[in-house]
Image (spheres, rainbow, N blue to C red):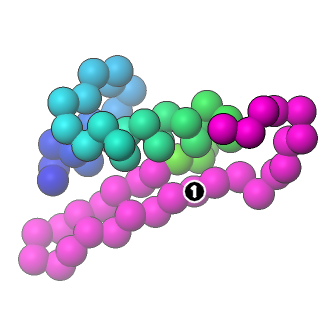
């Protein structure tokens, strides 16, 4: 879990695991900006918290995915 947290929250381009979460994080940042994305916080024995921060702005000029 710690490796995944480090990879998700770093600027590293190569990620060996959790590629789905990393891709979602990159897409959110690409379309919404660097202050948005996926944040993972985990503590042994307590659990994991996943926060997805997205923009509420609508941009009609961008193509839908």
| In-image side of 31 versus 49 (left or right) | right
Image quadrant containing the C terminus: top right
Residue that extends furthest to the bottom in the rendered view of this protein: 46
The answer to whether 38 appears left or right of 7 in the picture is right
Q: Is residue 53 visible?
A: yes
Which residues are the magenta region? Answer: 38-65
Q: Is residue 44 above or below residue 34?
A: below
Label 1: element kind: strand
Q: Quadrant of residue 4?
A: top left
Q: Position of residue 24 (x, y in %)?
A: 47, 43
The mark tally for this picture is: 1
Residue at far left of view: 45
Circle 1 residue: 53
Task: Identify the residue shown where x is 17% and y is 78%.
Answer: 46
Left or right, 37 with respect to 2, comes to: right
Residue farthest along the right direction in this orientation: 60
* In magenta segment, residue 32: no
Does residue 40 sit above or below 59 in this rendering?
below
Quarter of the rendering containing residue 50: bottom left
Q: Residue at x 25, y 29 (%)?
A: 15
Q: Position of residue 64 (x, y in %)?
A: 74, 39
Question: Image check: 13 left or right of 27?
Answer: left
Q: Residue at x 46, y 63 (%)?
A: 51
On the image, the x and y values in percent for residue 28 come to: 58, 42
Residue 34 makes an appearance in the image: no
Magenta span includes 49: yes
Which residue reaches farthest top?
13
Q: Is residue 8 above or below residue 63?
A: below
Mark 1: few/some/many CA within 10 Å (<14, 14-19, 20+): some
């Amino acid at each position: 879990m710690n490796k995944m947290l480090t990879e998700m929250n770093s600027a590293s381009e190569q990620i060996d695991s959790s590629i789905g979460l990393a891709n979602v994080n990159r897409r959110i940042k690409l379309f919404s900006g660097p202050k948005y994305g996926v944040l993972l916080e985990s503590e042994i024995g307590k659990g994991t918290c996943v926060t997805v921060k997205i923009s509420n702005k609508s941009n009609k000029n961008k193509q839908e995915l």
